Structure formats: structure tokens, C-alpha cells
Image (cartoon, rainbow, N blue to C red):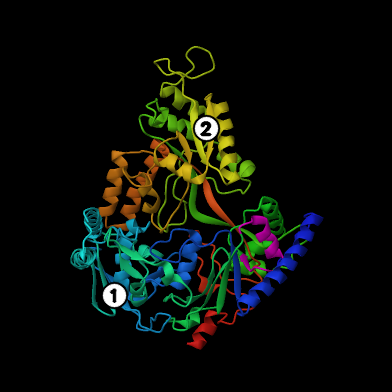
Amino acid sequence: MASAVAPYTRSVRLAIGLILLLGTLLAAVIAAEDRRPRAEVVFAQVADCYTLDPQRMTYMQDLRLARGLFEGLLRTDPDTGAIEPGVARSWTVSDDGLEWRFQLDPRARWSDGSPVVAEDFRSGLRRALLPDTAADYSGLLMAIAGAPEFFTWRSEQLAAFKPSEGAAERAWAEAETQFRSAVGIECPDEREVIIRLSRPVPYLGNLLAFPVASPVHRPTLERFTSLDPESGRRVEDPGWMQPGTMVSNGPYQLARRRYKRDIRLERNPHFRDPTQIASESIEAVVVEDPSTAVLAFVAGEFDWLTDVSAGYRTEMLEQQQADRTRHAGTLAAAAASGVDLDTALASLPPPADDERRDIHALSTFGTDFYHFNCNDRLPDGGLNPFADPRVRRAFALACDKRMLVERVTRLAEPVADSFIPPGVIPGYEGPAGLGFDPERARLELAEAGWIDRDGDGRLENAAGEPFPVVDLLYSTGSSRYRDLSLALRSMWQEALGVEIECRGQEQRFYKEDLRRGRFMIGRGGWYGDYLDPTTFLDLCRTGDGNNVRGYSSERVDALLIAAEAERDPQRRFEILAECERIVCEEDLPILPLCRFVTIVMYDPAEFTGLTRHAMLDHRLERLRTPRSTGPATQADAEAER
């Protein structure tokens, strides 16, 4: 399936043999427990799913499975990001952009055969907007008319709740009435959903394609829902997400789930368009050890590794580059004729022993960056030099990002001088950013008043106070951020003459320190949730929950508000580009480093269906191996119809 791992060591070959043996033994154990045949697609992920509840999930591995289990009103084309029909076969938008009407496909069915109706969507959206659910992505839906007010109203109702007989039931009945009367979601009949907004949201289609807006199977969920008599909250037993109980409306249904082992999905026999489904069954297997995952892939245990983090992945990527260089002319000709990369790779002769074709670096809609603490004072009351944007610009200008991606991460990620990944959002063109200029960096520090006034080699301000030792916070658990932080320390100490201490914290302590502003520079990072600049720029809004930097700009806030009211798409993008320019060229509340890449493994000749679009919205129903029995091409699908 995959090429040999030569020229790696003999011990690696031995390890592969052991993996094969262990795989055989594991297969025997699984067969004894579960007599299902091997799935048509088997992939490995480094972590188990946290939840299969579409309204509560946030992790990539959860969202990936959600798109296989559930289908929203709309969906996105995985290769372009364009909005396309989901359960809604058609929709219209009013001239003022405030009313969206959706007509549902009458073929839409739940996995138990019952029809998907408009009220299923209203119930799903209500779950997302209830404080009881504690949905991390409820903020995506707050442009729905009355949604913020309802969230606040229910929160206050629960805060004031006093236990008594029947009080929880009365409170919930009142909440249901309040939601129906105050929130702009209507269901005139079983086949129509109307959503009214408080302001135009041109990217609402992207939001409704996100799993948080999935419908729910109300009869199943109600069986597992109760009201807590002490708090008045709706409480849901997670048992509704178990195999044999969970009812879904996507191309797949849940067939098996074993904690920290695997999840198996099988074709939903009632999915509205079965010709879309390339494989009858899919298994996601948890393999926490990175090297074990690679070796098992090479041994043929998996068709796809979703995230390769083995320490030798850079050497593997170098082997891949050797293969690409060898066939550069052929690949360029294929690209010029419109052939996608995977198809072109699959048609090439086998790679040489020192080359490989089964590892791929996929660019993402994400930016790796560091936060600057922008507050006037640090939590201990001490002076914070990073409150001055000139100091922040100095540190940004003194960062050699090219060196970082070539010598530290060694993944050759695209360097980033702006916040929003360029070329991903159609029609949007962001700013250039600052780039690398150590000489200008030192001038910026001097203009901010930081110079060596007494010749002792340290910087002082006009009051004679020395530049404080910079607290550089990063999260442990990954060598990436330790290595980046140490490299940044060396760069800045050499270029700027400042003293820096790197401070590693476990993830939960690191997040708490960020939230409380206990840092001067801190490791960050963000993946966009939808194809619009605001998925990044809202992090710079005053008071935003993800604005841990304490950054506040009247100009940025005003531009974000102006963009909300702008109806002309191009003018709106121009406003947002100016907002990003201020953030990335003047104020620098963050220091963009590079675009995130995801390293995956699959053999293009044996495994198809993945997308290379930066959103990495991999659609499970498109995945195909030689074992797959669904339609192989669109022509086959049309023939089945």
C-alpha cells in the first residue's frame, strides 16, 4: 500500500514486523468481540473524540465525524468552500439581507426512517443558544434576531431560580415560550425554515453549514433529557449518543464506539442521496503514539493518518520533496491541464527507495502566532512596555520567520506577516504586514524611549528604569512551542538587547495564565471557522472572549461595526482589509509567524476523496479505497440515480 521506509534503520524494519504481528493479534481480538468485517476506509487519529454532540463539539476530530453523521440546512463544497444545498434544497435571501428562507428536501430522512422536518432545525438551533447546553460555538449564531437577548434572559432566569415543586417545569415552559416569541427562527410548516437576523451576515451560509447548526432528532433527545429540580437547567444524559440509540441524518450512522479505541460508522440507509456515499463503512481508530501510527500505516493497517507528528516527519517530507523534484515537469504539466495533484501523483511510476509519495503537507486556514500583552500594567502592577505599539512593532520586525520555519519547525510552512491566510477567502486581499527588518526594529524601540542611556548594555526608559525581563509563556506537551520560544528569545536578545525568560506551562495552566493576562508574550494560534475575515478579526474586537491580549482600538472596533452594516461585498472587504492592516502593520497585538500545515499520510494511488482546500473540510462520504463498493465517479452516481 505505502512505499517502503528505506533508508530508515533496521530497527524500523523490525518494528514494522512487530506492528504486523500486533495488528494480526489485534484483528483476532476485535473479531472475537465484533464480527463486522474490516471497514472499507480505516483511518487513525491521535486523540479520541470528545463528544459526538454537534452543538457541543469544538475539536477537529469531533467536527470531522459530525459532518458524516449530520447534515445541516447547507453544506460547503470541500474543494472550493462554496455554499451548496444540504437538507435545504433551495433558499432565498431578502434584499436587506435580514431574512433567509429555506425549503427542505422532502427526501431528507433520519437514520430511523422518519422525515427531517423544520422543527428539528429550530430545536437544534435552540440547543446551541441555551446557556444550559454551554455550546462553545453559540457565538456564531448571535446575529439571529433576539438570540443574544434570549441567552441573557435564560441565564438570568437560571441565576434567579429557586427550587420548589414544579418550579423547573414552569421555568422551562416559560423559556420555550420566550424562545418562540423572541428569537427570529420560524417554521411555517414542516418544509420551511425562516431565519431572521438583527444585522446582515453575508457569510450566514457558512455558519449554517457548521455542525453547531445541525438538526436534532427530538424524540430520541427528549428521552434522555430531564430538568434538574435544584438548578432548573435542562440536563441531557449522553446515552443518546451511543450506538443503537443515536439517530442521525447524515450519510452515516454510528455503528460502534469504544472509548479511546475506535468509532465505526456505517451507511445511513435512509440518507436523502445514497449515490453520494463512496464507502459503506468507515472506522476511526485512536493511536496516541505518533511513531506507532506511522509504522502501522506503512504496515497497511490504515488508509489515512490524519495528523503525523512523529519526530522524523521532516526527513519523510524531504523524501517526498525528492520525489516531487524528480517528477517536477510531469506534475507541472498535469497542473497546467487542470489535473489535481493527487491524480497526477497516482499516475507516476513508483518512487525510488529514497523517495516517498505517501506523506503530504496540507496548508490550512490557520495562523500560528504569539500574543503581546497590551494592558498598561501587568497583573503584579509592574510596568508593561508592550502597552506601547512601537515596542510591539519592534519585536515583530526583529523576528526572522523564514529561519524559524526552515531551521526550527523544519516544516517550511508559509511565513505569515498578516493574520488572515491569503488566497483562501475569494475576493479578499489583506495587507502585506511588516516583514523582517532588525534595523527598523531598533529604531522603533528608540522612538518608544528605550535606549542604552548609561552604557551598561541594557535599555532604559526616560525615567532610567531598565527594560523589564520579558516573560515569554508557552505551552508544554509539544516540542514545537518550546523550540520556537527558545529561538525567539535568542533572536530578540541579540537584535534588541533585551533579556527574556521562557516559561513553559502545562496546557490548562498556560490557558489560565493567558486568560488572566499573566504573560508579556504568549504562544497563540487560530484556525478560521468559516470563510470570512471576521473569523480572525473578531479576536481583535474590544472585549471579545478570545481577546486575551487586552487589546482595544477604537479604530478597529469602528471598522468592524462599519463592516457589519456594509451591504456592498467588495466595499465590506476593503473595510476589513483596513482593519487587518491596522492590526498587522500598526498596532501588532499579535505577532503572526506562519501558516499552520497539517501533515498527513495516504497513498494517492490507493486512497482518494480528501481535499487540499485550506479549510480541510474532509467529507467522509467521499473517501474511497480499493475495498469501497459505492459509486466510483460522478457518472456512476448519476447512473445509480
For image coordinates 31% across by 39% down, the residue present is: 553
Residue visible at 32% across and 74% down in the picture: 120
Q: Nearer the viewer, residue 603 or 167?
A: 167
Q: Residue furthest top?
A: 454
Q: Is residue 419 above or below residue 467?
A: below
Residue furthest out toward the front: 165
Q: Which residue is mark 2?
A: 398
Give the Cα separation between the discs numbered 1 and 2. 56 Å
Magenta stretch containing residue 444, yes or no?
no
Res. 393 image quadrant: top left
Identity of the residue drawn at 47% across and 83% down? 269
Residue ID for mark 1: 119
Q: Looking at the image, is 260 positioned above or below residue 437?
A: below
Q: Which quarter shows the N terminus?
A: bottom right
Please, what is the three-letter code of the amino acid marked with disc 1?
A: Glu
Outermost residue toward the right in this view: 10
Identify the mark nearer the N-term, 1 or 2.
1
In the displayed structure, would residue 564 be above or below residue 431? below
The image position of residue 271, as x and y in percent, is: 44, 81
Judge whether residue 328 can be spotted in this image: no
Which segment did they paint magenta?
Answer: 288-304
Q: Secondary structure at mark 2?
A: loop
